[in-house]
Image (tube, rainbow, N blue to C red):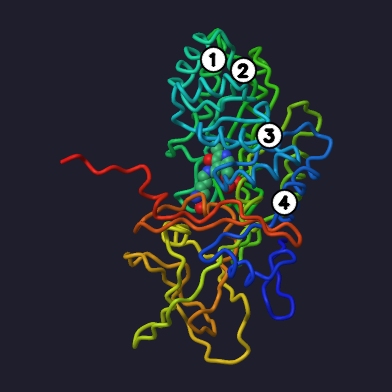
């Protein structure tokens, strides 16, 4: 459920017609709905109810500080994977004590900063990382809170690029080896074992693989307890899918309550790291048709949005719905490939979409709130789009469109 709906023949973001946003801020432009972010966060929070829990929104999905601030105000924690993400959380007013630090390649300076501000936990992914973290904490005279990210070897049944819980993936520690690695961690003086963590993939459309992973992790939790290692929390990662097309993923509330049911009778705090299921349908990307180019073989609509603005279609052949801001009642329906101005054949946002179009028409790419702007680039020296947040009747510019001056500001011509 989101707040991008048609009213009187035109598309609105909450109470604001998107045509008005495009007229004011230009295109391409990301438009977010505060109410949708809040609804999605609360769906998790309410479903987890009285069970001790911490929802750590995965910053990588959409890291604009206004988005982080909206979530922080609801009490959200954050899952980060770099010091850049940590600084964003701090700038947005997030609490460091609700931050979990994930990722396979944490550098010493990143560990130092995270220890300095006091993050909730480091999700450690290898023995080498355990040693490094122990050394950094020792230098600072601190104890680092840790959990091990284990790889439960379940097939998430999702795109191979975003499946992370299989043995052949680079992520986590093989669950079979985990007891030995916990024993090693226990012997390192500047580490404190707090929990266990796993993340099996992204855009999962069923609860089953999560429950399978949870079962395996709970076996580990119990076996550690027998060895005298008692954990305080279990972090199940993110990964719940959203509806882009015909998928029918469970609602966050349904997913969360099934997980909680399995934890009945245990005192383990549950941590979750949802990204997409909070952000994807809280955003759209507006783009305008520049030209129609109808050839013998295909009909193209050349739009002003491109793969540098929204990479998912080019990178994963991802399908995202593309709808007109003001649907035309008359005109010729054609099957368009919606292509951008970037010089790559892979530069498309949608293929074979049946639409009635004229040059100048405004389109909205739906479900663009997650892994949209966050994965954008300046490829072809294009300025990255503006981002705006709609809140009821109000529209806030939360990131201005880049300028060419921004792009070259960090560069320098060599003297001769
Ligand atoms: N926690 C960890 C450790 C992760 O690696 C991820 C996502 C998440 C949480 C959040 O997962 P989510 O709830 O968003 O599925 N760029 C890809 C998605 C990559 C996901 C990477 N990890 C896409 O556009 O589909």
**Callout 3: SS:** strand
Q: Which is in the foreground here, disc 4 or disc 1?
A: 4
- Mark 3 highlights which residue? 271
Query: Dot 3: few (<14), some (14–19), or many (≥20) neighbours within 10 Å?
Result: many
Q: CA distance from mark 2 to mark 3?
A: 15 Å
Q: Which residue is mark 1?
A: 185
Label 3 C-beta lies within 8 Å of the nearest ligand 1 atom: no
Residue 154 at least partly seen: no
Instruction: Determine whether the residue tagged by mark 2 lies in a helix, strand or loop.
Output: strand
Mark-to-mark CA distance, 2 and 1: 7 Å
Measure how far apart labels 4 and 1 are at the Cα level: 36 Å
State the residue in front, 160 or 24.
Answer: 24
Q: Quadrant of residue 285?
A: bottom right
Residue lying at 66% horizontally and 61% vertically, measured from the top left: 248
**Cβ–Cβ under 8 Å for marks 4 and 2:** no
First in sequence, mark 2 or 3: give its number. 2
When the figure is inspected, residue 163 is found, relative to residue 142, above or below; the finding is below
Are discs 2 and 3 less than 8 Å apart at CB? no
* Rendering coords of residue 166 (x, y %): 48, 40
**Residue labelled with disc 2:** 193
Contact between marks 4 and 1 (CB within 8 A): the answer is no
Checking the image for residue 40, the label placed there is 4
Furthest-left residue in this view: 416
């Amino acid at each position: 459920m989101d707040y991008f709906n048609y009213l009187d023949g035109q598309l609105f973001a909450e109470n604001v017609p998107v045509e008005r946003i495009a007229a004011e801020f230009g295109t391409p432009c990301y438009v977010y709905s505060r109410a949708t972010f809040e609804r999605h966060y609360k769906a998790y929070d309410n479903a987890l109810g009285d069970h001790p829990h911490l929802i750590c929104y995965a910053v990588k999905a959409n890291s604009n500080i206004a988005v982080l601030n909206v979530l922080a105000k609801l009490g959200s924690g954050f899952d980060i994977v770099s010091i850049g993400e940590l600084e964003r959380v701090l700038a947005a007013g997030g609490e460091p004590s609700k931050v979990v630090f994930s990722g396979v390649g944490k550098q010493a300076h990143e560990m130092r900063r995270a220890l300095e501000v006091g993050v909730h936990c480091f999700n450690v992914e290898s023995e080498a990382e355990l040693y490094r973290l122990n050394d950094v904490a020792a230098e600072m005279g601190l104890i680092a809170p840790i959990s091990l990210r284990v790889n439960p070897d379940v097939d998430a049944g999702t795109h191979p690029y975003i499946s992370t819980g299989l043995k052949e993936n680079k992520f986590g520690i093989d669950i079979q080896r985990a007891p030995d690695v916990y024993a090693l961690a226990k012997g390192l003086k500047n580490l404190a074992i707090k929990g266990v963590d796993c993340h099996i993939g992204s855009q999962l459309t069923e609860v089953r693989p999560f429950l399978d992973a949870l079962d395996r992790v709970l076996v580990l939790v119990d076996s550690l307890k027998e060895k005298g290692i008692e954990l305080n929390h279990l972090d199940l990662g993110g990964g719940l899918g959203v509806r882009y097309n015909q998928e029918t993923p469970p609602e966050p509330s349904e997913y969360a309550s099934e997980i909680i049911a399995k934890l009945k009778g245990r005192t383990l705090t549950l941590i979750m790291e949802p990204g997409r299921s909070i952000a994807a349908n809280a955003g759209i990307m507006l783009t305008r048709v520049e030209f129609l180019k109808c050839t013998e073989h295909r009909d193209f609509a050349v739009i002003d949005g491109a793969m540098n603005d929204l990479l998912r279609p080019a990178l994963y052949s991802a399908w995202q719905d593309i709808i007109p801001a003001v649907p035309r009642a008359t005109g010729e329906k054609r099957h368009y490939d919606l292509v951008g101005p970037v010089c790559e054949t892979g530069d498309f946002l949608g293929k074979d979409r049946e639409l009635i179009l004229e040059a100048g028409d405004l389109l909205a790419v739906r479900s663009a709130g997650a892994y949209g702007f966050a994965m954008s680039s300046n490829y072809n020296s294009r300025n990255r789009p503006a981002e705006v947040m709609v809140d009821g009747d109000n529209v806030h510019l939360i990131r201005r469109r880049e300028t060419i001056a921004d792009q070259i500001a960090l560069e320098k011509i060599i003297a001769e």
